[in-house]
Amino acid sequence: MSAAARLRDRFRKSADKRLKLVGASGQLGYGVPDAAFQAALERAPDMIGADMGSTDIGPTFLGSGEMATAPEQTRRDLAKLLVGARKLDAPLIIGSAGSAGAGAHLDATLAMVREIAAEAGLSFRMAVIRSDISAAAVCAAIADGRVQSMGVLPDLTAEEAAASANLVGQAGTEAFVRALDLEPDIIIAGRACDTGIYAAIPEWLGFEPAAATHMAKIVECASLCCLPGGRDSILATLDGSGFELESMNPARAATPMSVAAHSLYEQGDPHRIIEPAGAVNVQNARYTALDARRTRVEGATWEPAAQLTIKLEGAALVGQRAVLLAGSADPRFIGRVQENLAEVEAVVRSLVCGPDEAPDYELFFRTYGLDAVFPWPSPPAHAPREIFILGECIAPTAARALAVVKSTKQYLLHHGFPGRLSTSGNIAFPFTPPELSAGPAYRFNVYHLMQVDDLAPYFPVELETV
């Protein structure tokens, strides 16, 4: 009997209708603190979950199909969770496999899981949820007026959808529940809503979606909801009216304020956690301290969606990137840095392009210490003692991008400007070469909602015996 089937049978027969769920990691692949995870296992949880992905890492990994995390550390984290879950015979659910959850990311994660199982002598039933969405399906929805902007990007066109190197949809709780119907030990999903990882087993066992989804929203980031926030594993205990939270690191406390604050995390609406099948309204939720480290949450309500939707994510290639790293402590250079950079850019354009040739590249500068992080409306009252300059070129080829930044480096180093005291030395480089190829550059070109009549066809589930 599989871990999922055994949990269902035990839950049906038991008078104790509480579930213990462990959020092992907020993003698997960056390391799982061992002491907290082992403490979680000692509490004999009913399931273990972890999210592996996010759009926080930017568009490059979705576009390229590569993992954002280091393979060695990713494999270490997967092994820790896999061995721990099998030791307890508890279901293990992982979402957004391999950082961005496209087919390449999912397949790379599955390969690691199979290798770990072979080395550790483990066998199990594994359900796999795929999240790739075809451009043809999206284009058909665009034609039917069923794709809408989320306010970040303009209305989606068929051309943009077709330009995506990878196009995925976020699977919700529904897909994980269908996977559980196959009675697996482990579920590995492509791109997925973080909440689906933890809300699926409760809903599969008959819990109402409000408390289950609210709980899932909190535990998917592990102990980030605590004071001080961290990535240690967290334990949630769910019952018929609410849930309790406890970090597995005794130095972290889940307080009413910290947990309530995390309910707002990544939400455009402070009162509603929006999912494909509906929304959790937390406006009247109550957060009560059980002691100095634990909080109980009750009072969320569920609002079924009038229209099912899938959040789409896509990334398109824009070119090859090269960067230039430089700094300055010359007050005369810093005093007119924007003019200097504009003048250098014009000189470089005249050198790397022909007289009648339009630039085939884009060259940007970010001046850290002045306005690189935030576009301040006015300069600082007092100029900084030193600044860091990041030059970025995006061009059709890596060689072209590197050629542009190499010329930029040389003419930035020797640029003549009013008040200059030396012919060089106005710019410093942290190392040589200061020009680096940074690989392909991508942009998010799809970040939209697609209306659907049924979620299941977009997230097929496969079952594999490992």
Image (cartoon, grey):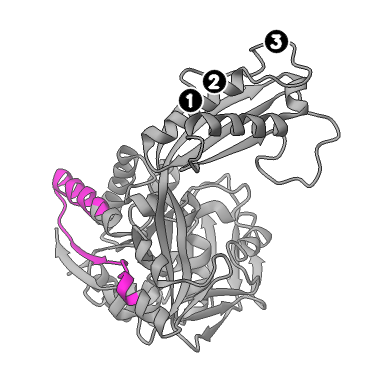
Left or right, 305 with respect to 5, comes to right
Three-letter code, disc 1: Lys
The quarter holding residue 49 reads bottom left
Q: CA distance from mark 1 to mark 2?
A: 7 Å
Q: Percent position (x, y) of residue 197? A: 39, 66
The residue that disc 3 covers is 422
Q: Percent position (x, y) of residue 365? A: 60, 36
Three-letter code, disc 2: Gln
Sequence-first disc among 3 and 2: 2
Q: Please name the residue shown 79% across and 17% down the image.
A: 419
Left or right, 115 with respect to 261, comes to left
Q: Are marks 3 and 2 in contact (CB under 8 Å)?
A: no
Q: CA distance from mark 3 to mark 1?
A: 21 Å
Quadrant occupied by the C terminus: bottom left
The residue that disc 1 covers is 406
Q: Are marks 1 and 2 in contact (CB under 8 Å)?
A: yes
Left or right, 167 with respect to 108, comes to right
- Given residues 206 and 446, the one toward you in this image is 446
Q: Please name the residue shown 47% across and 49% down the image.
A: 57
Quadrant occupied by the N terminus: bottom left
Crowding at mark 1 (Cα within 10 Å: few <14, some 14-19, many 20+):
many
Q: Judge whether residue 328 is colored magenta.
A: no
Q: Secondary structure at mark 1?
A: helix
Q: Judge whether residue 125 is colored magenta.
A: yes
Magenta-highlighted residues: 108-137
Q: CA distance from mark 3 to mark 2?
A: 15 Å
The quarter holding residue 191 reads bottom left
The residue that disc 2 covers is 410
Q: Is residue 368 visible?
A: yes
Q: Secondary structure at mark 3?
A: loop
